[in-house]
Amino acid sequence: MSNHPLPSLTLRSVLERSAALFADRPALSSLNDTPLTYSDVYESTQTITHWLREHGVGFGDKVVILSENCSHWGVVYFAVTCMGAVAVPILTEFHSDAICHIIRHSEAKAVFVSEKLLSKIEDAEFDPTPLFINIETFSPIALETARDTIRELKSAGLREFRKWKEKALALGSQPTSAVLQDGKYRGPEEGDLAAIIYTSGTTGHSKGVMLSHKNIVSNAVGIECYVDINENDRLLSILPLPHTYECTLGLVLPILRGAQVVYIDKPPTARVLLPALGSVKPTAMLAVPLIMEKIFKTSVLPKLTANPLLRFFYRIPLTRRFMHRAAGKKLLVTFGGQLRLMTIGGAPLAGDAELFLREAGFPYAIGYGLTETSPLISGSSTKNCQLYSAGTPLVGTQVRIADKNPRTGEGEIQVIGPGVMQGYYKAPEITADVMTEDGWLRTGDLGTLDCKGYVTIRGRLKNVVIGPSGENIYPEEIESFFFASPYVLEVLVYGYAGKLTARVHLDTTKLDDLFGNLPAPELAQKTCALLENIKDDVNGKVSNFSKIQRIIEQTEPFEKTPTQKIKRYLYVDS
């Protein structure tokens, strides 16, 4: 990087530099498909930019991307941002009403949409109507006949695209609205808006986070002090690209460093993921805590505690570390055998899962951030990852603890730096609420900052429950104790009607093994007894004011955000 510095902190500079340095290297591809090279990606973005301008999309216009992860997603993202327009990625899990609201609220001039997601918008009415483009074929579609049109156009991928590109480049007219006086298009500058990210947070309110080119690129550049991604790396993408975590660390950073990103076109279930890992043999990946926690809980821990003798040895720290190390070697083979970096972020990682990763010698690194910070605030490398910590702040980013408790050192984490957003789109009042008078972002997270600069997260400020004598009770901290039980898959702790309540989703497979085919009334009775035992075990490990008073079975998995955080607002008032 130092030998070939970026001329500016813009996405256009990122792509142009990498296209020059890594022209023939593979850049983006779907699993088992021929990859687009960096030269292909650059030429494709130029073509799309030209085509968009021909159809009236200019500097500062909003362009929606509504698609599953694929190589064309990245091409469109760079095409839109490199021309100075604004990318508006939409999470595919959003309800159709929310998607249509975002298209209207952002005043999108164009919408790139995949065939699978077309049904979410095809019956909607827009005024004015945006330009709709099939992201798989890069062909314009008429919304009223879109499904039939896409079926006719669906085809051949890169070969057909190149034919279309040649035709598009033959066009010559240019809309004067997008041209400067010297006849050249204005390129984006560092402070220009690059993307609006409509969040799907745990609060239930979606807001449009405005990120500039400098916000995003400075974050990608800053991450380099923690992780060494280079042109020899292969990343397997398993998280949604519309989320800033995946977009910045899983797309912009690899493009910046000349690496290859491979996408799978289905949800990353074990049945899909395991063959993909064997095929791609990734050297680096991004994950959210729930993925690693489930691997530990359902695949690793049961084997390490399969009988009384193993459980006895597992309770001894020395033999546990030996067992973890052996399991870690097998896990690396499962991940393709060449993994040297797994970054984990988006939510806190359960303590028992992190202890396993540490003792197993698994090459993991922890980060902490928000969509509003592009996203990373702090991070670590595989070598300096401190147990149960979220790492140290990025270079140029400052963290402080506000309203600090003098006894515990805990307070709200606040941050200032080049990654902090420009604000919420069309919401100056909400923006003002999250910014302090001296320009720091209120994260809403509780944490500490030690003398070495390591940030530790305690939980969300809004989730704190006040105890009977005014004590601060941290639900996330209590939740970690529940996972000592092999029967607990997910848990949510909250205050309800003056009682500290736990809502628990149990592993039904293990329940079947435990109880067999009991009649429904007897099964319900046994399950209630099991829940009470779990509650008693947790209460034996926490302070008196943090004891669970009520426990409820959550029969279905909790609804979650794209980073697999439970949507607490759906349950805390139940």
Image (cartoon, rainbow, N blue to C red):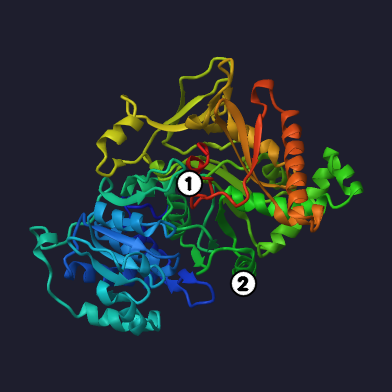
Q: Nearer the viewer, mark 2 or mark 1?
A: 2
Count of numbered marks: 2
Image quadrant assignment for residue 528: top right
Q: Quadrant of residue 397?
A: top left
Rendering coords of residue 96 (x, y %): 36, 60
On the question of residue 179 being in view, the answer is no
Check the image and report above or below for 272 versus 388: below
Between residue 144 and residue 301, name the one nearer to us.
144
The picture places residue 384, in percent across and down from the top left corner, at 62, 40
Q: Residue at x 29, y 67 (%)?
A: 123
Q: Which mark is residue 279?
A: 2
Mark 1 Cα-neighbour bin, 10 Å: few <14, some 14–19, many ≥20 = many
- Seen at 48% across and 46% down, the residue is 223
Q: Is residue 376 visible?
A: yes
Label drawn at residue 243: none
Furthest residue to the right?
A: 309
Q: Which residue in the structure is indicated by mark 1?
A: 223
Query: Which residue occupies the foreground of this view, 249 or 531?
Result: 531
Mark 2 is surrounded, within 10 Å at the Cα level, by few (under 14), some (14 to 19) or many (20 or more) other residues, namely few
Q: Are marks 2 and 1 in contact (CB under 8 Å)?
A: no
Q: Position of residue 234 (x, y in %)?
A: 55, 64
**Residue type of the residue flagged with mark 2:** Ser
Q: Is residue 504 left or right of residue 25?
A: right
Mark 2–mark 1 Cα distance, whole angstroms, equals: 27 Å
Q: Residue drawn 31% across and 24% down?
A: 437
Look at label 1 and name its amino acid.
Ile
The answer to which of marks 2 and 1 sits earlier in the sequence is 1
Between 228 and 252, the one lying in front of the other is 252
The spot of residue 140 in percent (x, y) is 26, 75
